[in-house]
């Protein structure tokens, strides 16, 4: 089944403790992206990647890192999480063409205390 | 940067009534436009997309949207609401290179029996 898999689905952590949210897609998509969803703000793009070893900042990149060493994986790294990073995170992927739209993962609900 | 405005964060309709969810975009060039649906505790699913072909776009689950350049709108409609349509709906637009998607803040649809 074609899908984007995120792990974990739920995560509670403490301020400053490094964490990684994994994202993997099995559709051979070149384009991958991370979003955070907050009430009243919709989805905001954190980082995106056009291909292996090619990443760029979205609208809200502060406090996050990403890497794209393999085509299928695009992990999101929070080096020192803070409470304002409590949010619902989505990974998404797309074939190269912008007209095809995204396939989204099921989301990761992160709480930083 | 392009942007999307969804009018009405909450919309309630009776079962069987017309569904109309509004989306206006700003863009200096012809955009690609999308509607996504998010059911509780799930990721976003693509409902339909406009990619500069026919201005009336039909999607899944009986939804359709019409691209109106003169009004910079891409409103989502469904002739008869079903209880299963209750969800959050997001309008999105891509920018020129397709590197970034911009999402609206979402409209929560409630269907009243």
Image (cartoon, coloured by chain):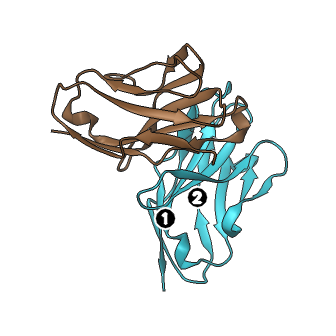
> Could you tell me residue B79's position as x and y percent?
68, 75
Give the chain letter for cyan: B
Q: Which mark is residue A41?
A: none
Q: Which residue lies furthest to the front in this view?
A: A1
Is residue B39 found left or right of A72 in the rendered image? left
Q: Quadrant of residue A92?
A: top right
Q: Is residue B113 placed above or below A42 in the rendered structure?
A: below
Q: In which quarter of the image is residue A99?
A: top right
Residue A64 visible? The answer is yes
When the figure is inspected, residue B102 is found, relative to residue B107, above or below; the finding is above
Label 2 Cα crowd, 10 Å radius (few <14 / some 14-19 / many 20+):
some
| Front in this rendered view, residue A27 or A32 | A27
Question: Which colour represents chain A?
Answer: brown
Residue underneath mark 2: B22
Closer-to-camera residue (A11/A26): A26
Residue annotated with mark 1: B87
Query: Which callout, 2 or 1, points at the residue further toward the start of the chain?
Result: 2
């Amino acid at each position: 089944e074609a899908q984007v898999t995120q792990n974990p689905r739920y995560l509670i952590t403490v301020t400053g403790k490094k964490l990684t949210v994994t994202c993997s897609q099995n559709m051979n998509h070149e384009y991958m992206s991370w979003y955070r969803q907050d009430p009243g703000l919709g989805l905001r793009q954190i980082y995106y990647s056009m291909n292996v070893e090619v990443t760029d900042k979205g609208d809200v990149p502060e406090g996050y890192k990403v890497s794209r060493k393999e085509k299928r994986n695009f992990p999101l790294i929070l080096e020192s999480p803070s409470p304002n990073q409590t949010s619902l995170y989505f990974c998404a992927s797309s074939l190269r063409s912008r007209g095809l739209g995204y396939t989204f993962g099921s989301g990761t609900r992160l709480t930083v205390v | 940067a392009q942007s999307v405005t969804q009018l009405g964060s909450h919309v309630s309709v009776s079962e069987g009534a017309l569904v109309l969810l509004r989306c206006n975009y700003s863009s200096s060039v012809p955009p690609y436009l999308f509607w996504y649906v998010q059911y509780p505790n799930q990721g976003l699913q693509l409902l339909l997309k406009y990619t500069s072909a026919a201005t009336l776009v039909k999607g899944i689950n009986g939804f359709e949207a019409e691209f109106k350049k003169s009004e910079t709108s891409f409103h989502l409609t469904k002739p008869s609401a079903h209880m299963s349509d209750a969800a959050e709906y997001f309008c999105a637009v891509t920018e020129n290179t397709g590197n970034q998607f911009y999402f609206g803040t979402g409209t929560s649809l409630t269907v009243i029996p």
